[in-house]
Amino acid sequence: MALKGAEIMKMLPKTNCKECGYPTCFAFAMKLATGGANLEDCPHLDPQVRAQLEAAMAPPIKLVTIGAGENALAIGEEEVMFRHEKTFFHESGIAILISDKESESDIEKKLKRIKAFDFERIGQKLKIDLLALCFESGDKGKFEALVKKAYETTNFALILICEDTDVLFSAASLCADRKPLVYPITKDNTSAAIPKLKELGVPAGVKGQSIEALTSVTSELKDAGIEDMLLDPGSKNMLEGIRDQTLIRRAALKKGFRPLGYPTIAFPCFMYQDRFKETLAAAALMIKYAGIVVLSQAEAQFLLPLLVHRFNIYSDPRRPMTVEEKAYEIGNPGENSPVLISTNYALDYFIVSAAIEEANIPAYLCIKDTEGLGVMAAWTSGKFNGEAIAEFFEKYAMADKVKHRKLIIPGVAKKLVAELEEELPGWEIILGPLEGSDIPKFLSEEWKA
Amino acid sequence: MKYEPPLEKISVNIRETVLGQGEKSVKIGGENTLPFHSFEGSLPNSAGLALEVLDTQPENWAPSVLEPFEDVVSDPVKWAKKCVEVYGAEMLCLRLLSTDPMGKDRSPEEAAEITKKVTDAVDVPFIVWGTDMEDKDAQVLMQVARVCSGKNLLLGPVVKGNYEKIAKAALEHGHAVVAQASMDANLTKELNIALCKFFPPEKIVVDPTASALGYGLEYTFSIIEEIKQFGLVDKDKMMQMPILCDFGGDCWRTKEAKESREQGILWEAISGITFLLAGANLLVFRHPESLKLIKEMVI
Amino acid sequence: MILIGEDLNVMTGEISRVIKEREAGPIKECVAGQTKNGMDYLDVNVGPVKKDPQGTMEWIINTVQDVTDLPLSLDTTNPVAMEAGLEVCKKKALINSASGTTESRETMLPLAAKYSTDVVLSVINDAGLPADADERAASIMDSAAFANELGIPNENIWVDPVLLPIGVDQRQVTSYLEFIQMLQDLLPGARSTCGLSNLSYGAPRELKSLLNRTFLIMIGRYGQHSAIVSGFDQELIRLIRGEVPEIVELIYRAMEEEDLDLSALSQKELEYAKTTQVLMGKSLYSHSWLEV
Ligand code: SF4
């Protein structure tokens, strides 16, 4: 349990001596709670109390990093069961499975497709994070060749899946500096794996037939000083996955149960043959706590929805989602196309841009930076008033973009009309519909410029 | 340290709502645990999965979502039959699009007549949906309530501005209603309080308004998740109504869904599974393939 | 509790017009009324004053000081107007307001130091509005440290924890309560204030004042130093000045007791009890909270 400031306070000396640099012990405690201070800064802490505090303040779910460099994936350190309680912090990684049984040309094709996969949506890069390399051929040479190829020709973080512990670690040693996840570590190979995990310094993918079975392995690893682990409770389908993942996170967060205080991995690729179902299971398990989901293919029409989904679920509900300020060109607008303006509150942008697309009338959609405030709130705070919009028009040279002089503003912003008529002389200010869903009709009927 | 499964028991239930009549009637809600948590509570009814039927020819539908209905779109009766007989829908949502005052502006009488014909032709439960125009919806749904008296339809959307009229007609003629408050738990509660003054709570389904993946899903997901928890965890009686999510149309309007059939189906199905995880009890789909996928996944 | 009257506000159309036309009458009337009603400070909200900030501010402050001896809270985002106002204030003024954003800190706090005035310092920072009590604490400590560096003592800092409308985010209201209780432990000696009427923004008109009054009593109990309120809300003023002790008592009880017995209460008492409960976050807010 992440400690609250008030709980930390109870364990501090309460002398308010200020030596930590804060005016009171309480102030120091609050800073500790939000991660802005260091326990070392209080010289008056009893060592035993310090150790207690350190243990209590440790995140209940450990942050684990797989991979190295730019493409390293960090997961864990989640604080809540439900997104609305705070936010989900570390996006689930998406891994694509490649088996050494696949033909060389198939592998080649797959890798090519994965590398070429490159989506951008409202300024966000949507990407695949890992390759999951699977030993199925029974031929050590083949597996190692696959691992080498992935290691040498791509920068992705790697997961090595191999039931033969010797082959697993020999492959891991080929790419140890990439910090691959080695999987599975089970109750049967733990003692053999421990020295190698330590030697190579790679994270362990712990697999158990049940949650209970996981705990003995994680405890053993922890006792051996290994803490970089991912958990796989062996769920066989989506519903089992939801159950297992929920219980693991609950045990870690609400019970402070350390043996389950690690991020998890789930394998939709092994749960369902059907590509649609596999993708759906992955979507569900991203909401229900999987740190990594492994998929069998990398086709865009399956991945794109999943990536957008991840982006949705991991956005921070405490901060309004925003989009970049600019004069968006929707369709291929020209000098006779309509000009609309709205705030950079992401939902406003989505609704209006989708409506313009639906109307199938190319248009300029001016998105003014309002720090994520909606129309009325932004107007009240001066970020979406006549003056601010006039500045926007100046900055983006809207008058040069179109020949007509008509501006469509959000239907709720009645008060803006007069302001804009003053600030944008020569422009006709048209009040749009109140509901986004009426925009298509509005545009096709009203737009006769 | 020994592992004990950290189970959480909840002592209250979401209300159970019965829709339709006779053998094919469907129950939704009734659970005393969070979605899919059958390991720690009871979920007596699986979610209701409805397919959409329009009372008029669809416009601007992407080919891949039009294709399953191509031969029946000109006739809502045939359309409804196909949904049930070919696609196995256990519930339908009849959208009275043609009553839109900005569009065809069909009269309440005509709309009610169509509704009667369609609901007579197939015996599954129906959601009957207006056009989000407060006044017109009131006229139309009141007339539908009368003409289809006793069919136990689910009429919506019922909003702050028209709930009294529609709910009174629904009460008189034995129907249920969908109380809609857009993306706001506080307003959802308020509308329920107002309705419950004269309307039986077990005949209310709430609609916090869903949205499509990539187009606001993150907001609606969290609001629905919260509403469910206000009901189950905080035991707020006014938040224990089953939840409806109507998102198929929004999904198929997105440019991503229009891009490819597979992408479109997933766009809708991922939205669907997301809302089920949030706590939805009743989903309205547009594509039979998305509905089928969800159905197969959750049983 | 220090009450700061909020009614001289450019956001109300009438005041905006009379400022433009330099018409002193309505301003004097507004000021005199609030003074008579027992306000301790008067807020002079002139907005961003784009045109002639200096002249406008001087004129309005002098006009106000013609009819009142009360100290003033100067409410403008324009530093030029602010300084012009501070120059002519007769009493120790309150700068309303600075926030933890880089820009605000660097323009407003130096003025507070230069003129040794009090300053409202909100918990908003470059990252926006803190999401909970702990984040509020972290933010205000940074800003206060910055202010202290400039030579502004805690006693001159009026912390504004930022009150959001309960209909918008009930959790922010409970975080406010949590935060105000810890303020003295965080910044010993610091004062506090808030824009009270924001709490009931969007609530039914006839119930706004009930929300505001109840909340003010609640935060008063938790050590709130002052609040910006309507200088014409007689019932609020009476309540806060201790003229209705039984209601105050009841609110305190509703704050504390899990299962307050509502059956024995009169209609009016019931309203206060229910309002307290909803403000404490014990039940989900809706505009019809009194009806359940
Ligand atoms: S140094 Fe330690 S004892 Fe002194 S004020 Fe800081 S926290 Fe308190």
Image (cartoon, rainbow, N blue to C red):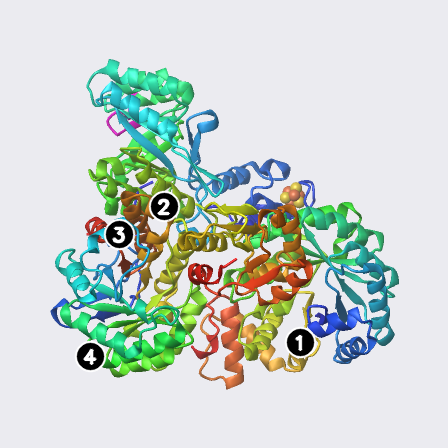
Mark nearer the viewer, 1 or 3? 3
Disc 1 secondary structure class: helix
Dots 3 and 2 on the same chain = yes
Q: Residue at x 44, y 40 (%)?
A: A90
Label 4 Cα crowd, 10 Å radius (few <14 / some 14-19 / many 20+): some
Q: CA distance from mark 1 to mark 3?
A: 63 Å
The residue that mark 3 highlights is B65
Q: Residue at x 66, y 76 (%)?
A: C240
Q: On the rendered structure, is A357 left or right of A135?
A: right
The residue that mark 1 highlights is C240
- In this orientation, which residue lies closer to the viewer: C37 or B122? B122
Disc 4 secondary structure class: loop
The mark found on residue B256 in the picture is 2
Specify the farthest residue to the top: A141
- In this orientation, which residue lies closer to the viewer: A268 or C214? A268
Chain containing the residue with disc 3: B
What segment carries the magenta color?
A: A183-192
Across and down, in percent, residue B80 comes to 18, 63
Q: CA distance from mark 2 to mark 4?
A: 42 Å
Q: CA distance from mark 4 to mark 1?
A: 57 Å
The residue that mark 4 highlights is B150
Chain containing the residue with disc 4: B
Across and down, in percent, residue A113 comes to 33, 28
Mark nearer the viewer, 2 or 4? 2
Mark 4 / mark 3, whichever is N-terminal: 3
Dots 2 and 1 on the same chain = no
Chain containing the residue with disc 2: B
Disc 2 secondary structure class: helix
Q: Amino acid at mark 3?
A: Val
Across and down, in percent, residue B130 comes to 33, 70
The image quadrant that residue A430 belongs to is bottom right
